Image (cartoon, helix red, strand yellow):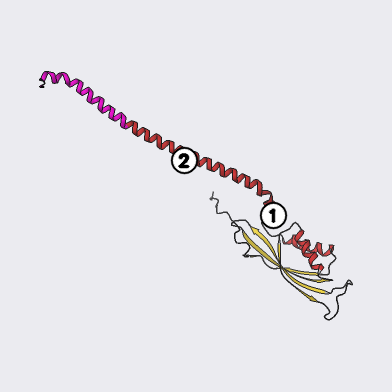
Amino acid sequence: MNLEKQDWQKLQAPLLTLGAVVIVGVLLFGFACYFSKNQELALQNQQNMLNAARHRYQLSGAEKEMIAEYLPKYQTLISKGFVGEEQRIEWVEHLREQHKTQKLFGIKYSINPQEKYMPAFAANLGGFTLNRSIMKLELDMLHEGDLLQLTEALNNRNAAPFILRDCEITRLNAGSQLSHQLIANLHAQCELDWLTLREPVSSYVTPAP
């Protein structure tokens, strides 16, 4: 079918309108796809933020429970002198106290400088540093029970733990039988490791004003 020029002129306006509608429709469709994609990304970001916040909250709750459970025990270790600076004065005072209480013979002692200690039984200290100070003891005894009572008294006290590393006992007046009279029958030379934990050094550096 042949269309006259007049007919084309009549169809021109509707065709232009149709073309404009198609173009607008395509643009609207593209914008809708773009907007939908952005909304999906925004929703995903919000979901990720929500998940991260929920995770932090759960960790915070676990940390609070851990702190509530272990803080009193940790504070007890601090009060005993196991965590923090060593308490040499308290050790010596308690040693003198036990000397008087148990009515022991004279005790001589010396304490070496503190040093780092890496025993096999403390492989993982969680950033803490284990230190020891070696105390050397010399005392005369009526019998072996004097040494046992002394070490048990030191161990039962609310103080830092120690390890009795070495103890050598010799008999006084060699060749004679042990006497139950109030005279020294034995002499002991012992070494103890007083143990303390140092807290991890914070890596945070305060900025200069």
Based on the picture, tell me whether residue 113 belongs to the magenta stretch. Answer: no
- The residues colored magenta run 1-30
Relative depth, front residue between 97 and 54: 54
> Gap in Å between the C-alphas at discs 2 and 1?
41 Å
Q: Residue at x 38, y 35 (%)?
A: 38
The answer to whether residue 121 is left or right of residue 182 is left
Which disc is residue 48 wearing?
2
- The amino acid beneath tag 1 is Leu
- Return the x and y of residue 175 as percentages of the image width and height: 83, 81
- Return the x and y of residue 65 as percentages of the image width and height: 63, 45
Label 2 CA crowd tier, 10 Å (few <14, some 14–19, many 20+): few
- Return the x and y of residue 179 as percentages of the image width and height: 87, 74
Relative depth, front residue between 90 and 169: 169
In the orientation shown, which residue stands out farthest toward the bottom? 175
Q: Residue at x 20, y 23 (%)?
A: 16
**Callout 1: helix, strand or loop?**
helix
Q: Which residue is mark 1?
A: 77
- Return the x and y of residue 68 as percentages of the image width and height: 65, 46
Q: Residue at x 33, y 31 (%)?
A: 31
In the orientation shown, which residue stands out farthest toward the front? 1
Which numbered disc, 2 or 1, marks the residue that appears first in the sequence? 2
Q: Looking at the rendering, in which quadrant would you find the N terminus?
A: top left
The answer to whether residue 138 is left or right of residue 73 is right
Q: Quadrant of residue 168?
A: bottom right
- The amino acid beneath tag 2 is Asn
Q: Nearer the viewer, mark 2 or mark 1?
A: 2
